[in-house]
């Protein structure tokens, strides 16, 4: 890890070269020159920033301009701790006392004059060769600052600017800004003036900013490792948008905390940067001293009295004080902001302990942003909502901060123990905003709410039990909060209590949190539903079959399997009894995108069903593995073993028919059992098939060969492990289903099998650091996309240890197998298979799911699509996008990215309802087209119901999928000409990308002409293919 940290520091540390110094000095000189041109005693009135003065509620703001007392560079540049790419220099401009009156600390006069002073500087800077913009100090609108950019950008310093921050020195008597003083006359409660600790701290911050900077500078001077630790902490914090924000951490506070630890000898000069980093995080996460506050102690200084310390803790959740600068440097940190900071620090310490390479990737390279961190994200659009500032824009705190607290309080009460953590932030100040025009435009950005769920059990709870009916006072409060939703109920234990009930279908339980949040916010805030965007169900449409989620039928499927298993074990008239039954199909482990719905014809008894709706003519079989009792009489030859299995299956089918009247059909390879609306396809697994493979290799490790027993064994192992995982993480299934839908909708079905997707998502739950395991569909899906797009597939194996049973020996074996595949690739770059190495306990050589695909070019395409989708999803979560079409774009694949496109007849797909978006193409050359076949219809016609039940059953097509057969034919016939991309879940488009053609054109009879090839493709799919378009010609190869 040390090497990686060194490289990171090299990359993010600014080179303090003479060129940089000159650029900084030139910008500062331009600022000084502009200020020098401002005439002394220039009369400054509220007209310079009328909106600001009006909205802040200040009076008596006129003054005569005087030059700044001093202009000094401070901040990170002064201690050489700037972190790229955000390169800026703080310039402290000390405001002269002559511009202020003795009582300007009252009623926002100081803040108004501060802004007016900057307005004059901004006006004169516009006449120089620099660009100037407004910004704010830590998102505090009442404390604007100026950003100054050079007209010509220096190479290597993109976006460089100087930030002008006003300071003052001994401007007001400190006692007048005591925490308990009321300095805003309008702020009263019942006629009694209210203390203004935040307002007072806001002024004190400016008075002691230079002193605090000097304290930090002295600590950092000549201590290289401390500076490096500061840089590492900034990189860490910037990756975490929920803590690098106005009410939590910033670069200044990082330096303050490090200075405190140094002053208390918690860190020593002998420590390396990474050791200081770890000590600091441990201190943030666990130190009990935070409960009392951090107080610097310098030699010869008197400490802060106990009484004053108590006042600080009463006023602020976090206190950091230095006797030489008697104000709370962390006055902006909120209680929930600090809880979040401690949580992030604790998670990072876990990364150091549990992740490979000391967690370097997870700590410094992984983006822990709002969208990926929280299980539920809510956006409140408060544009033009006057109730936000109904009492005034600025009281002790700003109205936006007060609104954050109000929303936080309401959601804490409404969600109760459903939520582990609720984070409310409103980044209301924008760059390039016109501060002088007032605060009314500062509501353009949405207010963001992030909710981390405490547990799935709590989050999906249908009933919330409130106070006992006998507790009148609490019951009244409960009813007042919940209104009509509150009801008195008697529970099973005889208790009569207030409660709220959130009834819904089981497959819609993930929407309970959304319903609670909407109800609470609509009831207690002046909002409409349109103002609330809850990111939770926007992708549910992709899992619906008709109007409901087919996962709702899983209960009846498992019941049918249970009955079948019992009947199989009860069969007596076969030589070897059935010893175990194990389901193999993804539907049994809740990871199938479309688990089958019960079909009216796949039943034991009954009359001809009435045609109440469109009845499918196709049905998916569900594979089930059977294991028989052990015997030494099995043949030794693998072909003979398969024939013996077939004989057993036929006998089993016959017994099921004779004993229970079940319908069974047989082919040479399979026996299908019709039962309770489902078709179960029986497969026998016999361990001798595995032992034969082992013997051929002569060792414990068998080489991968095409063995049915090996395939069934691996699938059964995979199925068992995933079932176990699902028991621990109920949300795993829905995330996998959306991930599979995405893979298929972008036509990656041919290069990424379902089991591989299941393992990728399993990795997110098993190794979630630096996050917690996802507890919502969209968060899990976003992390899946980022895993695909950001994982280092070339140099790292992805090891999924579901049951935590991989020993060090197993891990070494996996590592050796991985290195072997990469060595083969290095020796032969043409060998483009095995671009992903996906290892599990049952497959240590990555042979089961990613042995042949995706290859290098397929992976490159997959990564690009995943990155694009992840960026779009992130934008949809955080920004003001409520249009459903934008969400659909996540699953709409651009057909112009293929060289040719085949469009299919939609009414010839076996399950037309699964089609997400009908495909059309209005570009390229239309080279082939055809009419739909009349042989196959996806739904049975009314005429079919005149037949008997047996005849109807015979018309039911089991495992019929024309798309799969068509793609198989294309891959077999044209494997050297093009690559086929398709959607196995019901898409009506197939993409084609050409392999390189020979430049020596052969005769047309050989089918080498691209147009002729595409016409042949149309002929292959006659009756199924609607159109074939050529978009790009193949690249030629000599």
Image: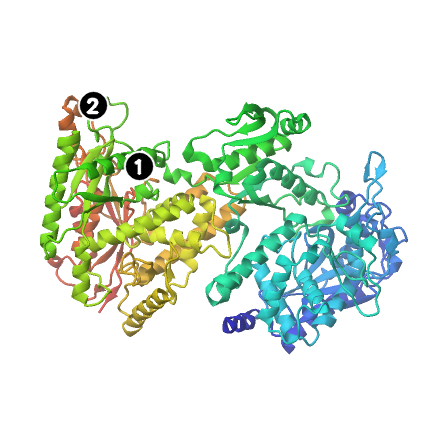
Residue 540 can be seen in this image: yes
The image shows residue 74 at horizontal and vertical percentages of 72, 67
51 left or right, relative to 812 = right
Above or below, 635 against 1038 in this view is above
Residue under label 2: 606
Above or below, 911 against 811 in this view is above
- The number of numbered discs placed on residues in the rendered structure image is 2
Name the image quarter holding residue 473.
top right
Mark 2 element type: loop
For mark 1, does the 10 Å Cα neighbourhood hold few (<14), some (14 to 19), or many (20 or more) residues? some
Name the image quarter holding residue 294.
bottom right
149 left or right, relative to 561 = right
Q: Quadrant of the C terminus?
A: bottom left
State the mark number for residue 571.
none
The image shows residue 319 at horizontal and vertical percentages of 73, 55
For mark 2, does the 10 Å Cα neighbourhood hold few (<14), some (14 to 19), or many (20 or more) residues? few
Relative to the observer, which residue lies in front, 397 or 335?
335
- Which residue is drawn at the image coordinates 40% and 55% (left, top)? 763
Residue under label 1: 558
Relative to the observer, which residue lies in front, 303 or 569?
569
Relative to the observer, which residue lies in front, 271 or 108?
271
């Amino acid at each position: 890890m040390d090497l990686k940290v060194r490289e990171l520091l090299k990359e993010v540390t600014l080179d303090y070269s003479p060129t940089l110094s000159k650029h900084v000095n030139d910008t500062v000189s331009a600022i000084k020159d502009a200020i020098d041109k401002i005439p002394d005693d220039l009369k400054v009135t509220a007209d310079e920033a009328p909106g600001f003065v009006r909205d802040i509620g200040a009076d008596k703001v006129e003054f005569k301009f005087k030059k700044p007392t001093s202009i000094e560079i401070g901040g990170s540049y002064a201690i050489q701790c700037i972190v790229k790419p955000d390169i800026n220099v703080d310039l402290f401009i000390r405001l002269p006392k002559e511009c202020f009156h003795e009582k300007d600390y009252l009623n926002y006069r100081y803040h108004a004059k501060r802004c007016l002073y900057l307005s004059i500087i901004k006006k004169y800077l516009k006449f120089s060769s620099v660009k100037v913009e407004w910004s704010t100090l830590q998102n505090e609108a009442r404390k604007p600052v100026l950003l100054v950019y050079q007209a010509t950008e220096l190479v290597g310093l993109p976006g460089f600017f100087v930030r002008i921050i006003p300071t003052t020195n001994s401007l007001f008597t400190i006692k007048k800004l005591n925490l308990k003083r009321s300095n805003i006359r309008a702020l009263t409660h019942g006629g009694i003036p209210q203390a203004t600790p935040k307002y007072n701290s806001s002024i004190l911050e400016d008075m002691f900013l230079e002193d605090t900077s000097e304290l930090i500078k002295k600590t950092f001077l000549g201590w290289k490792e401390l500076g490096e630790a500061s840089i590492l902490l900034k990189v860490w914090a910037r990756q975490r948008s929920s803590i690098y924000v106005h009410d939590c951490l910033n670069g200044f506070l990082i330096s303050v905390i490090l200075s405190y630890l140094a002053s208390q000898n918690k860190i020593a000069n002998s420590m390396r940067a990474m050791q200081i980093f770890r000590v600091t995080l441990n201190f943030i996460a666990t130190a009990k001293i935070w409960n009392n506050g951090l107080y610097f102690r310098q030699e010869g200084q008197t400490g802060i009295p106990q009484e004053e310390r108590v006042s600080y803790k009463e006023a602020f959740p976090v206190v950091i004080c230095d006797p030489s600068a008697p104000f709370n440097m962390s006055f902006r940190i909120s209680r929930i902001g600090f809880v979040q900071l401690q949580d992030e620090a604790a998670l990072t310490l876990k990364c150091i302990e549990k992740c490979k390479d000391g967690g370097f990737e997870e700590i410094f390279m992984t983006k822990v942003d709002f969208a990926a961190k929280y299980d539920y994200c809510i956006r409140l659009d408060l544009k033009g909502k006057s109730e936000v500032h109904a009492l005034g824009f600025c009281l002790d705190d700003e109205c936006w901060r007060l609104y954050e607290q109000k929303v936080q309080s309401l959601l804490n009460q409404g969600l109760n123990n459903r939520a582990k953590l609720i984070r409310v932030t409103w980044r209301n100040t924008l760059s390039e905003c016109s501060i002088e025009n007032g605060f009314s435009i500062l509501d353009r950005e949405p207010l963001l709410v992030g909710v981390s769920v405490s547990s799935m059990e709590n989050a999906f709870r249908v009933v919330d039990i409130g106070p006992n009916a006998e507790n009148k006072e609490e019951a009244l409060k409960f009813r007042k909060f919940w209104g009509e939703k509150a009801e008195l109920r008697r529970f099973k234990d005889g208790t009569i209590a207030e409660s709220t009930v959130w009834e819904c279908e089981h497959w819609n339980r993930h929407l309970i949190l959304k319903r609670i949040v909407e109800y609470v916010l609509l009831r207690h805030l002046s909002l409409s539903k349109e103002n609330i965007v809850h990111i939770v169900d926007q992708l549910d449409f992709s899992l619906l079959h008709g109007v409901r989620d087919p996962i709702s039928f899983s209960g009846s499927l498992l019941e049918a399997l249970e009955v079948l298993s019992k009947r199989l074990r009860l069969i007596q008239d076969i030589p070897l009894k059935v010893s175990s039954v194990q389901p193999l199909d993804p539907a049994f482990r809740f990871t199938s995108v479309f688990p089958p719905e019960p079909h009216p014809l796949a039943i034991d008894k009954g009359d001809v069903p009435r045609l109440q709706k469109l009845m499918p003519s196709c049905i998916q079989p569900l594979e089930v593995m059977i294991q028989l009792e052990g015997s030494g009489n099995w043949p030794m030859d693998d072909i003979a073993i398969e024939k013996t299995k077939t004989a057993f299956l036929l006998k089993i089918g016959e017994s099921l028919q004779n004993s229970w009247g079940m319908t069974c059909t047989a082919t040479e390879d399979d026996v299908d059992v019709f039962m309770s609306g489902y078709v179960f396809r029986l497969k026998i697994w016999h361990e001798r098939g595995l032992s034969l493979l082992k013997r051929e290799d002569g060792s414990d490790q068998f080489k991968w060969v095409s063995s049915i027993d090996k395939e069934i064994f691996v699938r059964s192992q995979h199925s068992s492990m995933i079932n176990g995982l699902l028991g621990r993480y109920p949300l795993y299934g829905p995330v996998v289903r959306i991930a599979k839908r995405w893979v298929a909708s972008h036509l990656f079905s041919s290069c990424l099998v379902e089991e591989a997707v299941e393992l990728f998502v399993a990795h997110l739950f098993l190794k979630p650091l630096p996050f917690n395991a996802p507890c919502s569909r969209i968060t899990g899906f976003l992390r899946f996309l980022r895993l695909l797009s950001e994982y280092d597939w070339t140099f790292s194996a992805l090891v999924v240890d579901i049951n935590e049973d991989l020993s060090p020996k197993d891990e070494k074996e996996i590592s050796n197998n991985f290195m072997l595949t990469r060595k083969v690739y290095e020796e032969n770059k043409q060998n483009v298979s095995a671009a992903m190495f996906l290892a599990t306990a049952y497959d240590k050589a990555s042979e089961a799911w990613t042995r042949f695909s995706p290859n290098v070019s397929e992976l490159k395409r997959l990564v690009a699509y995943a990155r694009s989708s992840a960026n779009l999803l992130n934008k949809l979560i955080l920004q003001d996008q409520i249009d459903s079409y934008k969400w659909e774009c996540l699953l709409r694949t651009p057909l112009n990215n293929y060289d040719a496109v085949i469009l299919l007849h939609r009414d010839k797909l076996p399950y037309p309802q699964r089609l997400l978006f009908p495909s059309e193409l209005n570009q390229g050359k239309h080279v082939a087209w055809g009419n739909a076949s009349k042989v196959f219809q996806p739904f049975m016609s009314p005429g079919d119901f005149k037949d008997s039940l047996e005849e109807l059953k015979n018309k039911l097509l089991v495992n019929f999928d024309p798309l799969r057969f068509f793609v198989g034919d294309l891959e077999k016939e044209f494997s050297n000409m093009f690559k086929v991309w398709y959607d196995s879940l019901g898409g009506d488009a197939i993409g084609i990308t050409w392999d390189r053609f020979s430049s020596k054109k052969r005769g047309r009879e050989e089918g080498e002409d691209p147009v002729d090839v595409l016409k042949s493709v149309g002929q292959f799919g006659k009756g199924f293919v609607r159109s074939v378009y050529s978009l790009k010609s193949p690249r030629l190869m000599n």
